[in-house]
Image (spheres, rainbow, N blue to C red):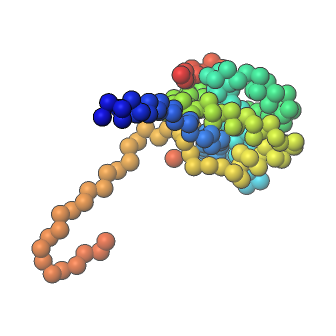
Amino acid sequence: MAGLAGCAHPAQLALAPEPPAPVGHVYQSLVPVPPAPKWVHIKPDDQEKIQVAFNVIGLKSALMVGALSCGQQNQYDAFMRAFQPHILADQHVMDAYFRRIGGQTKEDQFVTLLANNQSVGGLDQGKIFCLNNEAEFERVASFKTPDELDSFVTDQSPTPVVAAVVDPTPAPVKKTKKPIKHTSTTSTSEKSAASPTHS
């Protein structure tokens, strides 16, 4: 028995599990546009242009949050150099929209809430957040034209991770009725924002 014990194989060390694969598109890319008052008429063509502008500015905000949180400032700077004229034009579109519906204060509140919600979304993702954000940067770095960027934030919108505008009204709770024993039947939503910290 002692001889058999001496031939026993040493215990193998358990391998650390591989980190989950990055998925990219870490945020909701379809940014809810604050509704205009009834007396402000927005043409359908203008509404589409406004929506795309909000989506692009939302992506810019998301990438900034990731850059600050994950040390990806170089990737963010490269993104801005590549698309700065297009992003600036979309920023002007968003500025003009807010001038019509409420002014600078309302725009500042919207931008702050957007970045804060994106920060919360990053915290919820935990360690995978920076991997996701890296995948997002790699994707936008492959685009050659503004149209490709617009398509990315509009036609390829993922399932929302966190809403840009929070509705404080709780959803009504549906109460299920206990079955009754009888025979009848019944019918039957800039850098100043806090950035998430990831280990």
**Looking at the image, which is closer to me, 120 or 105?**
120
The answer to whether residue 196 shows anywhere in this view is yes
**Looking at the image, which is closer to me, 194 or 77?**
77
The image shows residue 35, relative to residue 89, as above or below, that is below
Left-right relation of 157 to 150: left
Residue that sits furthest to the bottom in the current view: 183
Residue name at image x 56 percent, y 45 percent: 160
Residue that sits furthest to the top in the current view: 192
Q: Percent x, y for residue 175? A: 26, 56
How many labels, in total?
0
Q: Percent x, y for residue 52? A: 73, 45
Q: Percent x, y for residue 191? A: 66, 20
The image shows residue 71, relative to residue 132, as above or below, that is above
Residue that sits furthest to the left in the current view: 181
**Looking at the image, which is closer to me, 46 or 151?**
151
Residue name at image x 30 percent, y 56 percent: 174
Left-right relation of 184 to 133: left
Q: Percent x, y for residue 30? A: 64, 46
